[in-house]
Image (spheres, helix red, strand yellow):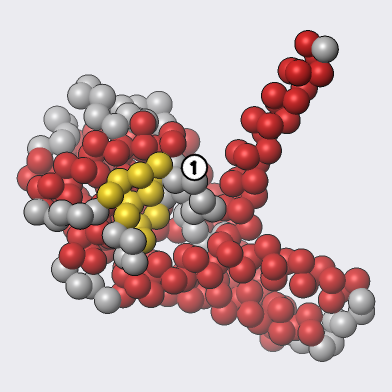
Amino acid sequence: MQVFLFLFAVALAVTMWGRSRFQKIYGQEIEYSLPSKITGAALAGLILQQRGIEGVAVEKSRGLIDDFYSPEKREITLSPSHFNGTNFPSLAMAAQQAGKAIQHHENHRPLFWRATAIRWTVYLSIPMLIIGLATLGMGMTKTIFPLVLLAWSLISFWNLATVPTELDAGERAKKQMEELKVFRNLDERVGVERVMGASSTAYLDGLFTVGSWVAKRLLPWARKKIKTEREN
């Protein structure tokens, strides 16, 4: 049991570090944008065009994973704020996904491992949490619960092991942005690239991703309901 708890504690510490690192850098750069006011979607399209990649769509996300490149669909999805946004984080997240499209175009196989790792991290986080709480409630602390901790830890470590693929995607996108002469000065370049680097750990915590998605869907509905009740 101690071994399982240790693995879980290490995995949890890594995921918390990854999320806090991303949020910190994201928040530091969100107020800045390029003079050109180019949007995230437009930048992704330019990067693909510069690399000579055709047939990759850039769409607004409607699913659990906001910013993602799907090798199967050949589609870049961006959150609405990043799709239309002009600030550094919007450009960084768009460029990062364009980098993955470049990886696919150049047949970089680890891309598929990374895409699978992100999906498993996001989609299995809530079920694993529910199963873990249920086993605790039923007193299965010496049977099923350790296996839940082990499974969650392995998923997190697998995700962490594929982070170099994320960094590689960023480097490929940076090369195209240099050729496009996107930045006027070093400050603009550093600001966008900081967020790109931090985004490599953005999906280590699947629970946050799912919680964020639920909040974005429920909050507008709740506000609309409150407004209707007040009007009536």
Pick the quarter of the image with the N terminus.
bottom right
* 224 displayed left or right of 203: right
**Labels in figure, total:** 1
What residue sits right under mark 1 in the picture? 24
Measuring 34% from the left and 66% from the top, which residue is drawn there?
A: 72
Q: With respect to residue 182, does 166 lie above or below?
A: below
Q: Residue furthest front?
A: 232
Q: Quadrant of residue 182?
A: top left
Q: Position of residue 121 (x, y in %)?
A: 55, 67
Left or right, 47 with respect to 67, comes to: left
Q: Is residue 98 above or below residue 28?
A: below
Provide the secondary structure element on which disc 1 rests.
helix
Residue located 12% across and 47% down the image? 49
Identity of the residue drawn at 64% across and 30% down: 220
- Amino acid type, label 1: Lys
Report the quarter where the C terminus lies. Answer: top right
Q: Is residue 21 visible?
A: no
